[in-house]
Amino acid sequence: MSSCGGTSDEDLQKKVTQKLQQNPQFKEIGATVKDGVVTLSGNCENGDCDSLAAQQVKTVGGIKSIDNQIHKQEKTDLTLRTSVQSVVSKYDGVQADVAAGVVVLRGSIDKKDVNSLMTELQVLKPKKLDNQLAVK
């Protein structure tokens, strides 16, 4: 404990960690406390998760300030990847990779199936479709 009646960094660390652990969305977020300043770090998966974590931590009494170093990972690639895989699984010989919203198609496809595949993938609204398929 500090001599002026404040909460020690160790006690703040425990309280902040408990707050973060209450929300599964914050499972990859860690916190360190030094001189009453909380530094948040780690990863989270949606657009406002970093500010939500900071708001949650602010409810702990005794914190002087918060240094938010949380890295946001867009969930869109995971969602897009899952959707793309369900589409391409209908077409023998077609594989797809997804990164940063870009879908890269590899393998081979029957000429009659190209339009339907591309239409199904466009509905998913990727940033870009990179078609490297060999058409049979």
Image: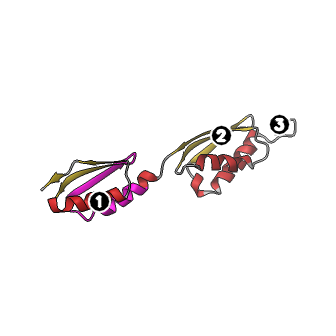
Please identify, in this view, whether the residue under mark 3 or under mark 1 is nearer the observer.
1
* Residue ranking furthest to the bottom: 90
Q: How is the image coloured?
A: secondary structure
Name the spot of residue 130 as percent of width and height, x first.
28, 47
**Badge 3 element:** loop
* Residue ranking furthest to the left: 136
Image quarter where the C terminus lies is: bottom left
Residue marked by disc 2: 32
Which label sits on residue 119? 1
**Badge 2 element:** strand
Mark 1 residue type: Thr
Q: Nearer the viewer, residue 87 or 68?
A: 87
Q: Residues within 10 Å of mark 3 (few under 14, many from 20)?
A: few
What is the C-alpha distance between the residues marked 3 and 1?
65 Å
Mark 2–mark 1 CB contact (< 8 Å) = no
Does the magenta-highlighted stretch encompass residue 85? yes
Mark 2 residue type: Thr
Mark 3 residue type: Ser
Q: Earlier in the sequence, mark 2 or mark 1?
A: 2
What is the C-alpha distance between the residues marked 2 and 3?
17 Å
